[in-house]
Image (cartoon, coloured by chain):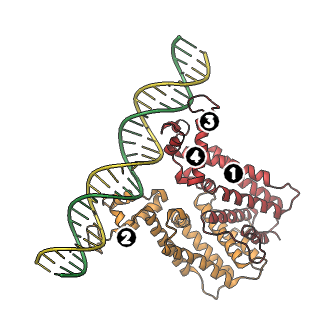
Chain colours: A orange, B red, C green, D yellow
DNA sequence: AGGATATATGGACACTGTCAATATGATTAA
DNA sequence: TTAATCATATTGACAGTGTCCATATATCCT
């Protein structure tokens, strides 16, 4: 155990976050508990209170970091300007989809506002970046249609978000389109694209 | 308090369900508690155990009844065969949307399988009816496309489900399409329809 | 009436999050 | 260096939770 700071347990805050992520990933949102984390770290049950004033503050930190993580992945994966619309939108939706499948409980936490502090500015800023990334792609490639760009963005985002959640909650299984043979998560994006591109 | 059965507290099972629904609606999923319900009903903290062996069983009952409720609303609202595709699909999505907005916490509970008993047959049957209703509408009006009907159904369902959840979790606000002036939840369906109908 | 069954009670246990009082480590000022 | 201050950790308490158990009572059936 590396002590980057002083005190008995080194950088307890970091270790709390790490353990919380492990519990979140392994046991779900309800599996994260202050006392449980303290126990796992061999520290008094009330030690975490110095770093997170309550459970909501802990979840807020988890959500903020997860948002930043997701945004950084999107930035890395999104192709440059030269690419076409289909490529960009498929890349975006694929990134969201794979993040959700890799970290199902983090993804759920991201959008369940009741668990985190809605007044937290850092969290809000981190969250807004995702939507900004999506609208950036769309507005760059949007064609004039009978609805505005924001409706197209919301339709896209709803489709992706809904499919990911259905998969995470096991209301849908992995599947392939029978006609094209491609993965379902790609096929449904194509369904929507054909309605947006003229 | 009407006693439809015997014993001190009449039909306790019904009253537990009713109180649980009130708590669910007012305080969310985490606001539902066995002891809290017992306290509200003026009954011993362990009385509910005779009717629901644990919390999961209670949630399973709540979810089952909510699914049946939603299915019955869809049946009532769905227009007859004479109607066209757009009408039918808008009616379906509108019903889901309004149920979700009226009973946000019931809607969330419906799809969070971790709260209910996945082995419960009645719950499974009640849930399957929803998807059956959607595919019935779609297959009746399906056109040949580059993807199969199931991909279209999943795209539709993902779109509706995603939009409802985004609204319920307050990740989106009520809005209107700037071009057409219609409500957002209708506009996004139109976006998708234009990709499905030829 | 008696016995079986369904239902309700109260106590216990191991948890939980949060708060308050206290103690100790680390840092800064005099 | 000593003293004061601050950050951090500990311990104990409190009210609350779900679940189990032994017990009691009500109801139903034979």
| Quadrant into which the C terminus of chain A falls | bottom right
- The residue beneath circle 4 is B20
Q: Earlier in the sequence, mark 1 or mark 3?
A: 3
- How far apart are labels 4 and 3 at the CA level? 17 Å
Nearer the camera: disc 2 or disc 1: 2
- Evaluate whether label 1 is on the same chain as label 3: yes
Label 2 secondary element: helix
Taking the image as shown, residue B167 lies to the left or right of residue A25, namely right
Residue A169 location in percent, x, y? 58, 58
Residue A122 location in percent, x, y? 48, 75
- How far apart are labels 2 and 3 at the CA level? 54 Å
A171 to C5, vertically: above or below: below
Nearer the camera: disc 2 or disc 4: 4
- The residue beneath circle 3 is B1
- The residue beneath circle 1 is B128
The number of numbered badges drawn on the structure is 4
Dot 2: chain letter: A
Label 4 secondary element: helix
Q: Earlier in the sequence, mark 1 or mark 4?
A: 4
* Observer-nearest of B83 and A166: B83
- Evaluate whether label 2 is on the same chain as label 4: no
| Callout 1 crowding tier (Cα within 10 Å): few <14, some 14–19, many ≥20 | few
Taking the image as shown, residue A41 lies to the left or right of residue C1, namely left
Nearer the camera: disc 4 or disc 3: 3
Q: Earlier in the sequence, mark 4 or mark 3?
A: 3
């Amino acid at each position: 155990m590396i002590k980057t700071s002083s005190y008995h347990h080194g950088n307890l805050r970091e270790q709390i976050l790490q353990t919380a992520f492990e519990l979140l990933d392994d046991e779900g949102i309800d599996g994260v508990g202050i006392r449980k984390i303290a126990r796992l770290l061999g520290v008094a049950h009330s030690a975490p209170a110095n770093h997170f004033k309550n459970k909501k503050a802990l979840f807020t930190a988890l959500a903020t970091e997860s948002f930043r993580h997701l945004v950084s992945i999107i930035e890395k994966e999104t192709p440059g300007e030269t690419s076409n619309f289909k490529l960009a939108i498929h890349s975006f939706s694929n990134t969201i989809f794979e993040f959700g499948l890799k970290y199902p409980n983090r993804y759920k936490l991201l959008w369940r506002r009741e668990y985190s502090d809605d007044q937290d500015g850092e969290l809000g800023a981190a969250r807004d970046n995702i939507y900004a990334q999506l609208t950036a792609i769309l507005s760059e490639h949007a064609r004039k249609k009978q609805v505005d760009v924001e409706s197209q963005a919301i339709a896209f985002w709803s489709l992706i978000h809904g499919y990911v959640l259905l998969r995470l909650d096991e209301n849908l299984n992995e599947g392939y389109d029978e006609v094209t043979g491609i993965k379902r998560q790609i096929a449904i994006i194509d369904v929507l694209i054909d309605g947006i591109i003229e």
